């Protein structure tokens, strides 16, 4: 059990001693010249794992998504993504500022896209209208509570993309959580897209980095954009070694994180003053609502050395079904939503202590 239980995100993990040893012993070169052997090994390994021709190590998932946007599109194109997508909400407006594209949004059903709705959102380019050139899917879906987009949905989207002539990018920041939860190999998800990113620095436990995968031509062009954005690293093999270690050791163990999240949800099912958003937890996230402002709840919980995510404002659909019908009103602010994320630095004893503390704080604040 840890003195402080940090469940703000799975980005807070620290590299293990074994991972640090691999980093210290890494053979390095200069990756801008493409002669860092450990970076090259990671990129090749990632591409093989995803069934793609090539891979590119980047400093962050946000940069990976930026490179995908810039490589697949031209300024003025239209990009389609979920209203609650990470690229829409949490990447500081990069589609507009870096890729210079117009974003068009669709609303998913609890994180799972409706392919008919996507088809209805597509535009063909003409003298007046930008054409839809790229669709971004996020798997797992963060804002939907770690939902896994099923393979059959990816397959249907891929078929639509082929028939309508647009590209598909998977923001797979937590792709391996989807793999472990569904039993579907990463390569099968990736086969439904033209490019895929996955984060090393979330559930896989690395200190830095993501990998972008696609065709050789796509990665060659993305490498130029990476340099443009300042992402060309030198002796990056030190970071790549952590990634190789993670791919060898930290994928299967994601099942532990999912088990801990389910136990956490079970322990909070009837907690006073709290309402779980989902009782069936797909991966490693638990969202619940508080009767008091989330910021106050988080502050009180921190006094128990339990850290949680409490965004100032979260937007949700007004409809009970969690999906906005065409023409319906938009969304409303909900300032009482808490997120808990399990990861490799959280063990079973931490979960039990967290349950006790969260229940105690909920009871005290709603007495």
Image (cartoon, helix red, strand yellow):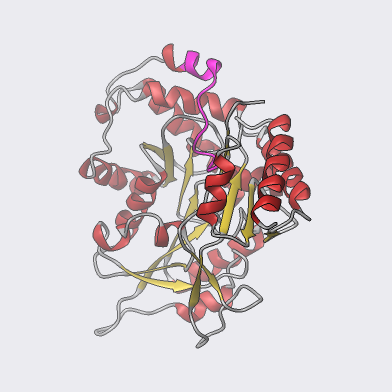
Q: Is residue 95 above or below residue 360?
A: below
Depicted 213 relative to depicted 143: above or below: above
Q: Which residue ends up furthest to the front in the rendered image?
A: 367
How far from the left and from the top, in percent, is residue 219?
35, 44
Q: State whether residue 226 is above or below residue 157.
A: above
**Residue at 55% across / 28% down in the picture?**
246
Q: Residue at x 52, y 46 (%)?
A: 299
Horizontal side of residue 63 vs 128, given as left or right: right
Image quarter of residue 49: top right
Which quarter of the picture shows residue 31? top left
Residue nearest the observer in this picture, 83 or 76: 83
Q: Residue furthest bottom?
A: 327
Determine if residue 165 is in view. yes
- Tell me: 279 left or right of 49: right
At 33% from the left edge and 22% from the top edge, which residue is drawn?
A: 36
The residue positioned 50% from the left and 74% from the top of the image is 332
Between 353 and 199, the one lying in front of the other is: 353
């Amino acid at each position: 059990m840890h003195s402080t239980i940090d469940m703000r995100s799975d980005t807070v993990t620290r590299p293990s001693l074994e991972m640090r040893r691999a980093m210290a012993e890494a053979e390095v070169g200069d990756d801008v010249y493409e002669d860092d052997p450990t970076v090259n090994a990671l990129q090749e390994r990632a591409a093989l794992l995803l069934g793609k021709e090539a891979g590119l190590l980047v400093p962050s998932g946000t940069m990976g998504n930026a490179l995908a946007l810039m490589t697949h599109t031209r300024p003025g194109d239209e990009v389609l993504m979920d209203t609650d997508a990470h690229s829409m909400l949490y990447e500081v407006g990069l589609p507009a500022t870096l890729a210079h594209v117009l974003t068009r949004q669709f609303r998913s059903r609890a994180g799972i896209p409706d392919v008919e709705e996507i088809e209805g959102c597509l535009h063909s380019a003409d003298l007046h209208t930008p054409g839809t050139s790229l669709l971004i899917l996020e798997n797992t879906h963060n804002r939907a509570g770690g939902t896994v987009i099923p393979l059959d949905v990816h397959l249907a989207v891929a078929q639509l993309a082929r028939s309508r002539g647009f590209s598909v990018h998977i923001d797979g920041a937590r792709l391996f959580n989807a793999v472990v939860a569904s039993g579907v190999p990463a390569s099968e998800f990736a086969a439904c897209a033209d490019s895929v990113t996955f984060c090393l620095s979330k559930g896989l436990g690395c200190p830095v980095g993501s990998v972008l995968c696609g065709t050789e031509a796509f990665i060659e062009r993305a490498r130029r954009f990476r340099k443009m954005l300042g992402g060309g690293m030198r002796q990056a093999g030190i970071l790549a070694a952590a990634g190789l270690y993670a791919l060898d050791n930290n994928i299967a163990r994601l099942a532990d994180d999912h088990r801990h999240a389910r136990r956490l949800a079970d322990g909070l099912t009837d907690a006073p003053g709290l309402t779980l958003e989902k009782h069936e937890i797909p991966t490693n996230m638990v969202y619940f609502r508080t009767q008091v402002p989330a910021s106050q709840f988080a502050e009180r919980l921190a006094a128990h050395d339990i850290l949680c995510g409490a965004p100032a404002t979260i937007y949700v659909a007004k409809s009970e079904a969690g999906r906005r019908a065409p023409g319906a009103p938009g969304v409303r602010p909900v300032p009482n939503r808490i997120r808990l994320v399990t990861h490799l630095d959280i063990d079973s004893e931490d979960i039990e202590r967290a349950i006790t503390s969260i229940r105690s704080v909920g009871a005290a604040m709603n007495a």
